[in-house]
Image (spheres, grey):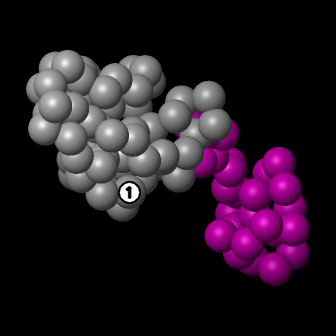
Amino acid sequence: RPCLTSDPCRAPMSEGSCTEYALLWYHHAESGQCRPFVYGGCGGNRNRFVTKLDCERCCGGAKRGMEPTWTTGGAAGGRQDVENPSRQP
């Protein structure tokens, strides 16, 4: 996992202060999405990822705390999202 020791996902996007530009990804906490940005190569914070997949693995693709709550059982005997019963796991 790309984030083992801290939670970088809530930090704001920070471009850094150098000019070794690279296209990276950051987690936009308000929308819950991973978005691209141009990183300067030094400084900044840990909310930066080499790939979108790394960002999503660390921070999730949906808003944190907004993941579905699954129950087991029910008429079909399967799992069901408590907030959105028509959603499939």
Residue depicted at x 86% and y 61%: 85
Position of the C terminus, as image quadrant, is bottom right
Query: Which residues are the magenta region?
Result: 62-89
Q: Is residue 69 above or below residue 51?
A: above
Residue 54 coordinates in the image, percent (x, y): 30, 54
Magenta segment, prevailing SS (helix, strand or loop): loop
Residue nearer the viewer, 34 or 42: 42
Asked whether 23 falls inside the magenta stretch, the response is no
Question: Residue shown at 43%/21% (left/top)?
Answer: 12
In the image, taking residue 51 as reference, residue 35 lies left or right, namely: right
The answer to whether one can see residue 8 in this image is no
Residue 68: in magenta span? yes
Horizontal and vertical percent position of residue 56? 42, 53
Q: Quadrant of residue 33?
A: top right
Of all residues shown, which one is farthest toward the front?
19
Tell me where residue 18 appears, x and y as whole percent.
15, 25
The amino acid marked with disc number 1 is: Lys
What residue would you read off at disc 1?
A: 52
Residue in view at x 45 percent, y 38 percent: 27
Location of residue 46 in the rendering, given as x and y in whole percent from the top left corner: 24, 28
Work out whether residue 1 or residue 49 is closer to the camera in this orientation and state it: 49
Q: Nearer the viewer, residue 72 or 87?
A: 87
Residue 13 image-quadrant placement? top left
**Mark 1, secondary structure of its residue:** helix
